[in-house]
Image: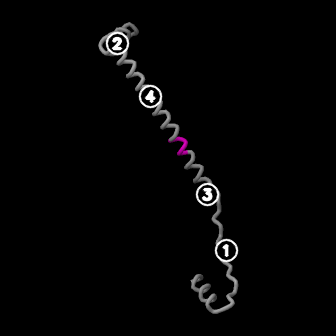
Amino acid sequence: MLNNIGLPGLLLIAIVVLVLFGRGKISSLMGEVGKGITAFKRGVSEGSKEDENDKTAEANKELAAPSPRNESVAPASNTAERETVESRNS
């Protein structure tokens, strides 16, 4: 049914819409559509940047080796220090 609408048909529809709604209403509607498209594009680009940042952070975590804990303990000079060191190690 809509396959036979050509350029003259589209122009006729545009004129009818312009007459029914008026120029001011249509221009404000088109402005809102433009703002919506801009916000959508901004959201998509921010989402892709977040995805890239997440992938980069995961890659950095995989590359970084865990640092071994070096818990060398000096010999304690008295019994109180020795008990504290022993309780930490157990």
User: Mark 4 or mark 1, which has the lower sequence index?
Assistant: 4
Looking at the image, tell me whether mark 4 or mark 2 is earlier in sequence order: 2
Please name the residue that numbered disc 2 is placed on: 18
Label 2 to label 3, Cα distance in Å? 60 Å
Which numbered disc, 4 or 3, marks the residue that appears first in the sequence?
4
The residue located at (57%, 49%) in the rendering is: 55
The residue segment tinted magenta is: 47-51
- Looking at the rendered structure, the secondary structure element under dot 3 is helix
Q: Which residue is mark 1?
A: 70
**Sequence-earlier tag: 3 or 1:** 3
Q: Amino acid at mark 4?
A: Lys
Q: Which residue is mark 4?
A: 35
Whether residue 11 is situated above or below residue 36 in the rendered picture: above
> Which of the 4 image quadrants contains residue 36?
top left
Q: Identify the residue at image location x=58%, y=82%.
A: 88
Report the residue marked by disc 3.
Answer: 62
The amino acid on which the numbered mark 2 sits, given as a three-letter code, is Leu
Q: Amino acid at mark 3?
A: Glu
What separation in Å lies between label 4 and label 2 (alpha carbons)? 21 Å
Secondary structure of the residue carrying tag 2 is helix
Q: Is residue 88 left or right of residue 15?
A: right
The tag earlier along the polypeptide, 2 or 3, is 2
